[in-house]
Image (cartoon, grey):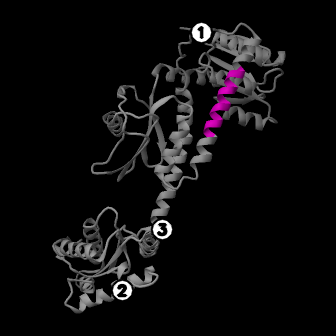
């Protein structure tokens, strides 16, 4: 069996002697160094199985040594045990944060040291194959330290850009676009993408760094979706930033995938590098180190978007609530006035809705409201806006639509609703109808605001009810 080699680094000859004697009596082979620089040289040359180091040392302290060992492929596998004084709590904390695997105070018992080293050896990963030349002396070690500090500074700069630019994103797609553009600045890639699978929805966002052939983009999107744990029937919300009308063919097999740790979601970051070999040697570790912060930005955007949607959506029907649909009507009216375009509204009231509650209970009434909202919303166009205006009243806002076209849409809504049998919670189905009032912006003189056009539509709604219900009145 191979003898475990332990490197002991301490500027105190007495402390080193005590540590060495304890470890050698326990059967370990011990190498020693009297300061951080010598410890780095020995560790990089000898590649010990465990490093035991002091923190406060001249030339290079234990924290700097630790950061070098943990960031260099030649020594990253070796667990590090720091030995500190009771008064070094801040240094001990920083040592653990920068990669130390365990710590002991200097008044430890000999068996505690042996137990700690034994435990670290048992849990240590296998060493990686190293092709980089080993250092010949302190100057080469300092050069390595400088390179590692530069890489750490670059990583911190990228992370700062991700957080600074991404945390203010107004939507999940905007957060995806911002974070992918930050990553694109440090990666020579043809395409980058983010995919997030939530229980009911999948968000997909691709950023094209150059014009790619459309079918190549589709293949990349399909490959990303294929890596997500999607629920059957989940809605997919996708956006692509960049020119999709190119003719550049790409090898989808070259996609590099990074998992994203998200709350209650399955996420992936994919990169299609121009040069896979160069990406593996230069950028892979940088991107991998930033994925946690990228996921934090996306989680923040998901939460902000969810809160915004909750403030705008009716809790029962999931369509716009009264305030949101009224505000959107005001926005669309302002746009219609500015460009001289038509706009119309439809207001609907479910007929005899109180009878449903009285006969079947309020749970049945809630089910009817949900089913009726879904049926009517499904009969509208993508550009139309639909919300719950009151108890059983619904309002549709129709941009770029004159009165004649709005009447046609209202009749379609009425027909779809009247022809639908809606299920009841206790079993069985029930039919429901609605009365509709329609008004167009062109009918009103002077400045048309949201209240004026809704009032006109509401008057016509009452006319529809007076005419026997289940009809449309302009």
How far apart are the two marked residues, 2 and 1, measured between alpha carbons?
Answer: 91 Å
Residue 403 or residue 301, whichever sits in front: 403
Span highlighted in magenta in the image: 145-159
Please name which of the two marks, 2 or 1, marks the residue nearer to the observer: 2
Q: Position of residue 118 (x, y in %)?
A: 60, 21
Identify the disc placed on residue 311. Answer: 3
Q: Quadrant of residue 285?
A: top right
Crowdedness of circle 3 by 10 Å Cα count: few (<14), some, many (20+)? some
Tags 2 and 1 in contact by the CB under 8 Å rule? no
Which quadrant holds residue 421?
bottom left
Q: Residue at x 57, y 30 (%)?
A: 286
Q: Secondary structure at mark 1?
A: loop
Question: In the image, residue 430 lies at what x, y percent?
Answer: 18, 76
Mark 2 in CB contact with mark 3 (< 8 angstroms): no
Residue bearing the label numbered 2: 456
Secondary structure under the numbered disc 2 in the rendered image: helix
- Give the structural element (helix, strand or loop) at label 3: helix
């Amino acid at each position: 069996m191979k003898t475990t080699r332990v490197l002991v680094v301490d500027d105190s000859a007495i402390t080193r002697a005590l540590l060495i004697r304890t470890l050698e009596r326990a059967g370990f082979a011990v190498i020693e160094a009297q300061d951080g620089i010598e410890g780095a040289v020995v560790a990089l040359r000898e590649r010990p199985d465990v490093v035991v180091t002091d923190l406060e040392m001249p030339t290079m302290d234990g924290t700097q040594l630790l950061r070098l060992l943990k960031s260099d492929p030649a020594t990253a596998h070796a667990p590090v045990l720091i030995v500190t004084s009771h008064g070094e709590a801040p240094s001990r904390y920083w040592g653990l944060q920068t990669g130390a695997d365990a710590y002991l105070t200097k008044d430890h018992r000999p068996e505690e040291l042996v137990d700690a080293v034994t435990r670290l050896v048992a849990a240590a990963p296998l060493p990686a194959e190293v092709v980089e030349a080993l250092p010949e002396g302190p100057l080469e070690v300092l050069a390595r330290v400088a390179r590692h500090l530069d890489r750490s500074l670059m990583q911190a700069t990228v992370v700062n850009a991700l957080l600074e630019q991404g945390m203010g994103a107004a939507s999940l797609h905007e957060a995806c676009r911002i974070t992918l553009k930050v990553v694109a600045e440090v990666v020579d890639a043809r395409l980058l993408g983010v995919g997030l699978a939530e229980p009911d929805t999948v968000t997909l966002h691709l950023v094209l760094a150059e014009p790619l052939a459309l079918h190549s983009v589709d293949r990349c999107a399909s490959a990303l979706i294929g890596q997500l744990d999607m629920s059957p029937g989940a809605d997919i919300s996708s956006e692509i930033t960049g020119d999709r009308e190119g003719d550049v063919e790409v090898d989808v097999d070259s996609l590099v995938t990074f998992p994203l740790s998200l709350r209650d979601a399955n996420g992936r970051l994919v990169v299609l590098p121009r040069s896979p070999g160069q990406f593996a040697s230069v950028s892979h570790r940088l991107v991998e180190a930033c994925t946690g912060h990228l996921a934090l930005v996306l989680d923040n955007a998901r939460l902000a978007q969810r809160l915004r949607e909750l403030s705008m959506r009716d809790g029962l029907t999931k369509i716009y609530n009264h305030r949101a649909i009224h505000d959107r009507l005001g926005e669309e009216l302002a746009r219609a006035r500015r460009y001289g375009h038509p706009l119309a509204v439809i207001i609907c009231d479910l007929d005899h809705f109180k009878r449903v509650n009285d006969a079947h209970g309020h749970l049945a009434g809630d089910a009817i409201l949900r089913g009726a909202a879904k049926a009517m919303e499904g009969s509208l166009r993508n550009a139309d806006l639909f919300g719950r205006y009151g108890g059983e009243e619904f309002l549709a806002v129709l941009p770029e639509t004159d009165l004649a076209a709005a009447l046609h849409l209202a009749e379609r809504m009425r027909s779809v609703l009247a022809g639908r049998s809606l299920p009841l919670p206790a079993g069985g189905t029930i039919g429901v109808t609605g009365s509709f009032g329609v008004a167009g912006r062109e009918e009103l003189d002077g400045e048309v605001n949201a209240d004026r056009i809704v009032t006109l539509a509401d008057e016509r709604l009452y006319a529809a009810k007076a005419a026997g219900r289940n009809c449309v009145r302009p």
